[in-house]
């Protein structure tokens, strides 16, 4: 507990010990012969940074890492080439971190570690490496992690950079399909004509092809961008969670035809 006396402007400055949890609540109590007041760090309604359109970060990191791979998706039994840039951050100033190596870890879709290696960092703060995907590797999204030696966690490593890439069995598309409506908007109950045009990527039309179509309707909602928060969606709360959190739209039509 700390105590102090306000100055002529009603302000008091108190030194507080460093805390690792910035969400730890803090109280301030003003008590005099004829005055009493109470302040709480959790009372922020109306003065939160996002309500003023400002970005905020209560846990700024000492280092910033930018990661990228040579492409976003791979097949099993293919190499993944990754690179990264490491900088030390002081507010909006970025300088070389002075580190000579950085640990890299890759997790598969099951959360299992499939790659762990410490790679060298150049004098320019860049690093790179290669990960060979196994021929029987599970399909899904993999996570590439770079960690910085520090004291933020109990094991002495601070997760810093993350990047996701996919592993899938895929084939290149042979043709593309474009759907063009006759109007951008119609009145409820009117008819809408759609033109479906499909062409091969090497050139030429996809002729005599069967076309299956589905029309899905999504409720309209108004996006408010002013001060404060307002909800313009008309939820039926009696329908329970399926009404509040259900995703997707309602199918209103389907059929088939020829292209």
Image (cartoon, rainbow, N blue to C red):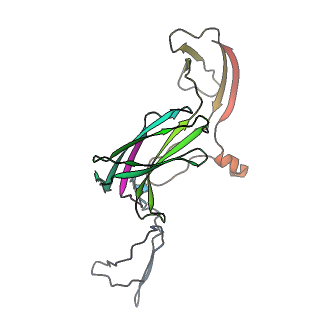
What is the x, y in percent for residue 232? 56, 47
* Image position of 164 (left or right of 110): left
What is the x, y in percent for residue 186? 58, 25
What is the x, y in percent for residue 44? 46, 65
Towards the viewer: 30 or 230: 30
Farthest residue to the bottom: give it. 33
**Image quadrant in which you'd find residue 220:** top right
Q: Quadrant of the N terminus?
A: bottom left
Q: Determine if the magenta segment contains residue 227.
A: no
* Image position of 85 (left or right of 25): left
Q: Residue at x 66, y 25 (%)?
A: 214
Towards the viewer: 243 or 71: 71
Q: Determine if the magenta segment contains residue 64.
A: yes
Is 47 drawn above or below residue 164 in the view shown? below
Q: Is residue 155 something one can see in this rendering?
A: yes
Is 109 drawn above or below residue 156 in the view shown? above
Farthest residue to the right: give it. 239
Q: Residue at x 42, y 39 (%)?
A: 82
Q: Is residue 221 something one can see in this rendering?
A: no
Q: Residue at x 45, y 59 (%)?
A: 157
Is 27 drawn above or below residue 46 in the view shown? below
Is 190 drawn above or below residue 123 in the view shown? above
Q: Quadrant of the C terminus?
A: top right
Q: How many marks?
A: 0
* Image position of 209 (left or right of 229): right
What is the x, y in percent for residue 255? 70, 20
Towards the viewer: 137 or 45: 137
Q: Which residues are magenta?
A: 58-67
């Amino acid at each position: 507990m700390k105590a102090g006396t306000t100055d002529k402007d009603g302000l008091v400055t108190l030194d507080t010990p460093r805390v690792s949890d910035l969400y730890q609540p803090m109280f301030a109590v003003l008590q005099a012969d004829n005055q009493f007041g109470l302040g709480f760090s959790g009372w922020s309604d109306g003065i939160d940074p996002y309500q003023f359109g400002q970005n905020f970060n209560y846990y700024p990191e000492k280092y910033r890492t930018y990661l990228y791979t040579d492409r976003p998706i791979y097949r099993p039994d293919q190499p993944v080439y990754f690179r990264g840039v490491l900088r030390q951050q002081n507010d909006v100033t970025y300088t070389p971190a002075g580190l000579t190596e950085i640990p890299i870890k890759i997790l598969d879709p099951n959360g299992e570690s499939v790659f762990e290696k410490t790679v060298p960092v150049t004098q320019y703060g860049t690093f790179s490496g290669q990960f060979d995907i196994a021929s029987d590797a599970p399909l899904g999204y993999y996570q590439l992690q770079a960690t910085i030696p520090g004291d933020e966690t109990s094991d002495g490593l601070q997760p810093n950079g993350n990047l996701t890439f996919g592993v899938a069995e895929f084939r290149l598309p042979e043709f593309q399909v474009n759907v063009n409506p006759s109007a951008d908007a119609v009145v409820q109950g009117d008819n809408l004509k759609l033109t479906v045009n499909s062409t091969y990527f090497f050139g030429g039309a996809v002729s005599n092809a069967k076309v299956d179509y589905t029309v899905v309707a999504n409720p309209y909602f108004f996006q408010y961008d002013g001060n404060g928060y307002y909800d313009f969606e008309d939820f039926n709360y009696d329908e329970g969670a399926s009404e509040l959190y259900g995703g997707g739209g309602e199918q209103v039509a389907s059929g088939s035809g020829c292209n």
